[in-house]
Image (cartoon, helix red, strand yellow):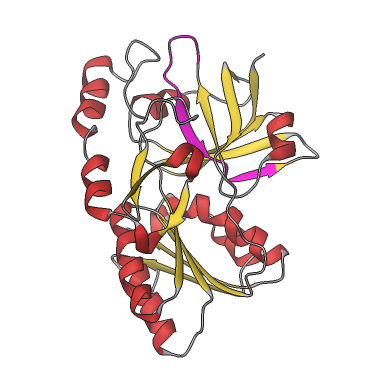
Amino acid sequence: MAYRIVKKETLNPQIFLMEIEAPLIAKKAQPGQFIILRIDEYGERVPFTVSDFDPKKGTVTIIVQIVGKTTRDLAKLEAGDELLDFAGPLGMPTPLEGIKKVAVIGGGLGTAIAYPQAKKLHELGADVTVITGFRDKSLVILEDELKAVSDKLIITTDDGSNGTKGFVTERLQELIDAGEKFEEVIAIGPLIMMKNVCNVTKPYDIKTTVSMNPVMIDGTGMCGGCRVIVGGETKFACVDGPDFDGHLIDWDSALKRGRMFKSYEQKSCDEGHCRIGRTNNNA
């Protein structure tokens, strides 16, 4: 069975959206879960968090940043093309029931993962503050979508090109200092960003959930590639997560593992010119 791409949209020069026909996955998917796809018989298995899903249309949306071989190959496809494999939903849904006041924080591409969390919380009646951070204005994504599902939206850029300069942690600290009483903070983005968010929330004992997305191969807990140290115990992001208590993460080991395959990713693109297949490196 092949999976047809029904829509492709460029969000900025580095990021694009794909809506894929996958009715069985769309019927069961929940915020926080992910899929694993393979472009063709030569391709590697690559995980992508579900950014949105529509059970009525039978489609699942993923948002992809071009960072390596497979994502470059994926970017060459257009609406009407097909993917060989599209497996899911995988991972544990984010527990969102019962939360009344929450800050959802997205860094860069993490904003695409934060969106379904904020959307679901909004549907459940929670007071939702969304804070997103990007390097500059040209990289901002999902602004209109996030406005529709949040009570307060703060978009910040490193260079201030959108009028709000700084980091998501600074905006979060300002809100806490102003008296905001968040029951929970959900942070999704680069490891260092999530670590710094946890450093902000820990002194106030604010529950902080982070989404860990290390290298995954099979998505069933068998390969061990996505292991994360949580509270001194080894967990597997693909089956135990991807969401964990950020205050229990061993951030030093997570950051070290996150840098392990960078040189291989670059070599794959440089030598293979980012063609489909042939090698099995990270996305």
In percent of the image, x 28 and y 47: which residue is there?
254
Q: Quadrant of the N terminus?
A: top right
- Residue 29 pos. (x, y %): 66, 41
Does the rendering let one see residue 167?
A: no
Q: Quadrant of residue 137?
A: bottom left
How many numbered circles does the render carry?
0
173 sits left or right of 145 in the view: left
Extreme residue in the right direction: 56
| 54 left or right of 243 in image | right
Q: Measured from the top left, where is residue 108 in percent x and y?
A: 40, 53
Q: Is residue 52 above or below residue 45?
A: below
Front-lying residue, 124 or 160: 124
In the rendered view of the protein, which quadrant contains the C terminus?
Answer: top left
User: Is 107 on the left or on the right of 147, as rendered?
Assistant: left
> How far from the left and from the top, in percent, is residue 113?
51, 50
Q: Is residue 53 above or below residue 278?
A: below
Q: Is residue 193 magenta?
A: no
Question: Height in image: 267 above or below 119?
Answer: above
Q: Residue at (56%, 25%) from the top-left corner?
A: 78
Which residue: 18% across, 30% down? 263
Boundaries of the magenta span: 40-53
Q: Report x, y in % for residue 172.
A: 40, 76
Frontmost residue, 273 versus 126: 126
- Residue 59 visible: yes
Farthest-out residue, front: 233
41 falls in the magenta region:
yes
